[in-house]
Image (spheres, helix red, strand yellow):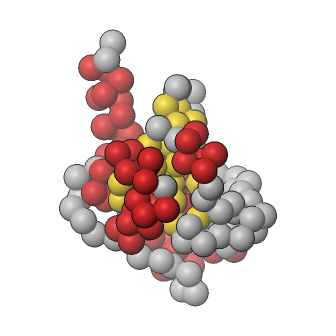
Amino acid sequence: MRRILFVCTGNTCRSPMAEALFRAKVAGHDIEVKSAGVAAYDGQPASQHAQQVLRDRGILPEHQSQKLHDELVSWADLILTMTLHHKELIHTFFPNAVEKTFALHEFVGNGSKDIGDPFGGGLDTYQRCANEIDEALEKLHSKIAAEQQANR
């Protein structure tokens, strides 16, 4: 079982979209997916626009935000952040997670760019953000599938 944790700031926009989009991609595979935020308040729903973007893609958004904590860090085999700053924060506050924490774009070979925060933007901003995340998740899915094939 592979366990992947997506992390952003408030766990209401980017990481919930990444979690839901990737969960849909890997349905039926041996992969668990969760998300959290480095500065999240527990129990918040995904933002309205994030929910709409997911519904437009046929995904029913069921999400409650959670702050990143020791148990989640321990649970995850791989932690993928939306920005390099999120990765640095995790490295600082969870030094045991350094070897398994990467920015999403970095991990899939897209360089060291960040996924911009759509918070406060319109639906079109969220759509662009979801498209960017989804493109990276396609690469992630391919990378994991290749690793699993190599390990057989």
Quarter of the figure with residue 145: top left
Residue 95 picture location, percent across and down: 43, 54
State the quadrant of the C terminus. top left
Task: Give residue 33's quadrant in the image.
Answer: top right
> What residue is at 24 percent from the left and 65 percent from the top?
112
What percent of the width, then of the height, locates residue 45? Answer: 74, 66
Left-right relation of 34 to 150? right
Residue 7 location (% of width, % of height): 51, 60
**In percent of the image, x 49 and y 62: which residue is there?**
93
- Residue 125, x across and y down, in percent: 48, 79
Q: Is residue 149 above or below residue 72?
A: above
At 31% from the left and 59% from the top, the residue drawn is 105
In the image, 56 versus 21, the foreground residue is: 21
The quarter holding residue 55 reads bottom right
Q: Against 115, is 147 above or below?
A: above
Left or right, 148 with respect to 50, comes to left
Q: Is residue 13 visible?
A: no
